[in-house]
Image (cartoon, rainbow, N blue to C red):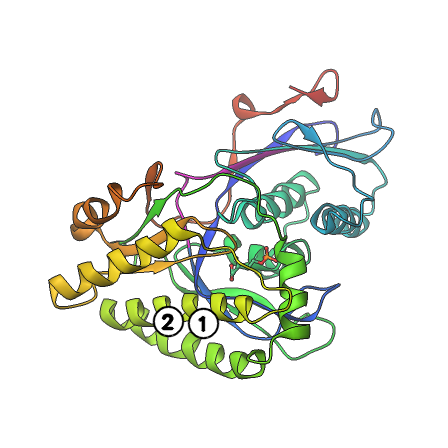
Amino acid sequence: MIDEVVTGIGTPNIALVKYWGRRNSSLNLPTNSSLSITLDETLNTKTSVLFSDKLKSDALYINGELQNLNDHKNEKSVFAAMTLDRMRGLAGIKYKALIVSKNSFPTSGGLASSASGAATLVYTVSMALDLNMTQKEMSINARQISGSACRSLFGGFVAWRKGEEDTGLDSYAECVADQNHWPEVIDVIALVSGAKKKISSSDGHRVTVETSKLYNARPNEANARVVEISKAVRDRDFETLARITMADSNSMHALMLDSYPPIIYLNDVSKQIIYAVHELNEREGSSIAAYTFDAGPNAQIITLKKHKDKVVECIKDIVGTGNIIVAGQGTGPRSLSKADSLIDEQNAKPG
Ligand code: PMV
């Protein structure tokens, strides 16, 4: 669909077993498999794409800011440009692209904005170029922009199989159970800070693998957790899911602290939330909630719909906790109508 704007919407995912550490940094190949929940559109990225002969060069705007596609300090923008080129090559065209993307939530604050952004970009570019890509093909392309993005192409509970091959062609995500299997599972997000993280996840992956003495134990442990938590999802066994989720978040943040220089994403508010969730579970006599933290201090508390009020109650008065957002499970990206376009098609400019 050349000279026509195409718009899509996609969402972040929250990993219950984390991806941390790469065996290949150019292709974003992980050292371990991981498993996440794709969130609904409570938090979302909208992306419009236009390929046109009116355009002299590629341009990518994120939240109104033009990105430098050659700035190697901003690895994800460079990877996005490479992915765009690869997909354009598959379509056999040479037209330049204008891509305008907006997140409904803080960018680079540890709320998986890059996962949501990269998955939506690949989905929308694939539509704009009429590539008819399978979800697996889109997952491989999104992975090359931001590793965790490969999971946001699918709905519900999603596993990223780490793969073995150097090409990365066997490193992609697949659905373990879709959003209709266990819809009671929700994510209560406590915003602790919307600030941009000090250490990018790209640097973090590298520093941990290069310097953490504890790192060697991680890949096998995480792979085993993916197997165990997948069974817990299939059996709708929340107790096991909660235990693995909290243990794995703690394990990733321990490796970060063991890196040199240390990588510290949690702050005092995050730590109080950790204690509050353990106290809640003790009072209840079983694990009804599980915290997990990505590359930032914001808490994501996985629970069941029926326990939502108890979870909100236990964290809302912790000083430093800001907005609390509740998200269910989503479907993965979908297309939007012309009315949602972020591009002024006539003038080939952001709208
Ligand atoms: O996808 P990246 O390179 O931004 O790495 C982020 C990894 C974590 O969010 C911290 C964990 C995960 O599996 O999503």
Highlighted range, magenta: 38-49
Real-space CA distance between mark 1 and mark 2, rounded to the nearest whole angstrom: 6 Å
Is 8 inside the magenta-drawn segment?
no
Q: Is residue 123 left or right of residue 289?
A: right
Residue 307 can be seen, yes or no: yes
**Where is residue 171 drawn, in percent x and y?**
62, 70
Residue corresponding to mark 2: 247
Q: Is residue 211 above or below residue 58?
A: below
Task: Please state which of residues 68 and 59 is positioned toward the viewer in this rendering.
Answer: 68
Residue 134 can be seen, yes or no: no
Q: Quadrant of residue 213?
A: bottom right
**Where is residue 179 drawn, in percent x and y?**
35, 54
Characterize the local packing of mark 2: few (<14), some (14-19) or many (20 or more) Cα atoms within 10 angstroms. Answer: some
Question: What residue is at 52 percent from the left and 55 percent from the top?
Answer: 295
Q: Is residue 7 above or below residue 288?
A: above
Residue corresponding to mark 1: 251
Q: Is residue 186 left or right of residue 215?
A: left
Question: What residue is at 18 percent from the left and 58 percent from the top?
Answer: 280
